[in-house]
Image (spheres, rainbow, N blue to C red):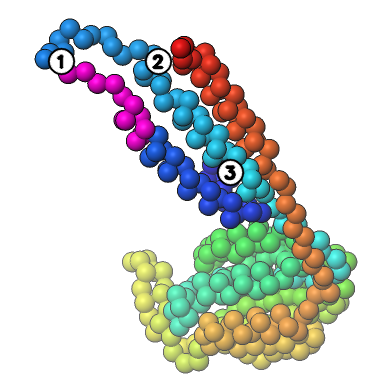
Amino acid sequence: MLNDWWQHISFAYSWVLGALLLIPILIIEYIRRSNRMQASMLITTTHFVKGTSSFKTIMRHAAFFLRCLALIFFIIALARPQQKFSEELTEGEGIDIILCFDISGSMMSKDFQPNRLEASKEVAKEFVKNRPGDRIGIVIFSSLSFTLCPITTDHNTVLNQIENVQSGYLQDEGTAIGSGLATSVDRLRNSTSKTKIVVLLTDGVDFGGTIPPDMARDMAKLYNIKVYTIGVGTEGEIQQVINGPLGAVTQTTKMQFNENLLQTLASSTGGQYFHATDKDALAKIYASINQLEKSKIQVTSYERAVDKFFPWILAGVIAVVLEILLRYTVFKKFP
């Protein structure tokens, strides 16, 4: 708890804390004076000295300890501890975005580091962080499609869901581009936002699914939804991990890519098609989309500070009162 407090506190006059260096000096001087003032008597044996310890002798340093404690509390109070709070006021109109991920087995190919899917997730998370004020959702597809996260302004939830995206999540293999796009359009069709976009990322040819890509494209056009398509993967042969009856097997396969389909989906809906051959290219593509689709959002940050010195003053006063009580009661000296 104390560590958490220190992480969220700052001092308006932090230079005052330098006065805490006086505490070790006072302690050293107190020890030196105590040693000098101790009475001594030379005796030949100590067998007869028993029960010399008492409450007073054990607690004789308590008053000095309380004085040091009070001094520490007052110095901290003088440094004016403050707890700061950051607030953001968002004004304007954002964009509704669906990130549509292909999670078929071929997305585990390692021509991207560590693989296509993980690289795509990392870049997508950076994209989300750069879209304050926008509502973002996630759709995943293989031979089936599924809404992993409805559109929301809670970007922490979106980031967590992106992290949870895994190949094989939908079990059935395939690359149902039409179904993935249709589900994405369905998530956006009731949106009242002026700008609605789908960022569809895939590495294969449309295979499986119940909705053909041209039907999904027409649905997107009907609801004025732009589709940005990203084809992921290097050209030529790649090493792909296949789960077979005997376990995981690595085999060389030739990349199949329906570039014409992705170009048509993008151009006919007012979007653009991109081809990413590595992670850096993918990051540049998301940056391009980020520039093409700008939100009319004004984010104003406010920072306010709440003084937290009163508890330290109160603690210092309590320590002083306890010291006075001890000195004039328990440790009172009579002439």
Residue at 82% x, 70% y: name it: 298
Please report whichever mark, 3 or 2, sits nearer to the chain's N-terminal start: 2
Residue at 45% x, 25% y: name it: 62
Please report whichever mark, 1 or 3, sits nearer to the chain's N-terminal start: 1
Residue at 71% x, 65% y: name it: 137
The relative height of residue 309 versus residue 13 in the rendered view (above or below) is above
* Residue 258 seen in this snapshot: no
The picture quadrant where one finds residue 308 is top right
Q: Report how many numbered discs are placed on residues in the image.
A: 3
Residue at 11% x, 15% y: name it: 44
User: Can you identify the residue that label 2 sits on?
Assistant: 56
User: Can you identify the residue that label 1 sits on?
Assistant: 43
Q: Say few, some or many: other residues with alpha carbon within 10 Å of mark 1 (under 14 / 14 to 19 / 20 or more).
A: few
> Where in the figure is residue 324, as x and y percent of width and height?
56, 22
Query: Which mark is in front, 2 or 1?
Result: 1
* Residue 254 seen in this snapshot: yes
The picture quadrant where one finds residue 128 is bottom right
Amino acid type at mark 3: Ile
Q: CA distance from mark 3 to mark 2?
A: 29 Å
Query: Which mark is in front, 1 or 3?
Result: 1
Amino acid type at mark 2: Lys
> Where in the figure is residue 106, as x and y percent of width and height?
50, 76
Q: Magenta part of the protein: which range?
A: 31-42
Q: Say few, some or many: other residues with alpha carbon within 10 Å of mark 3 (under 14 / 14 to 19 / 20 or more).
A: some
User: Can you identify the residue that label 3 sits on?
Assistant: 75
Q: Looking at the rendering, in which quadrant would you find the N terminus?
A: top right
> Where in the figure is residue 196, as x and y percent of width and height?
81, 73
Q: Are marks 1 and 3 in contact (CB under 8 Å)?
A: no
Residue 30 sits inside the magenta stretch: no
> Where in the figure is residue 302, as x and y percent of width and height?
77, 60
Q: CA distance from mark 2 to mark 1?
A: 24 Å
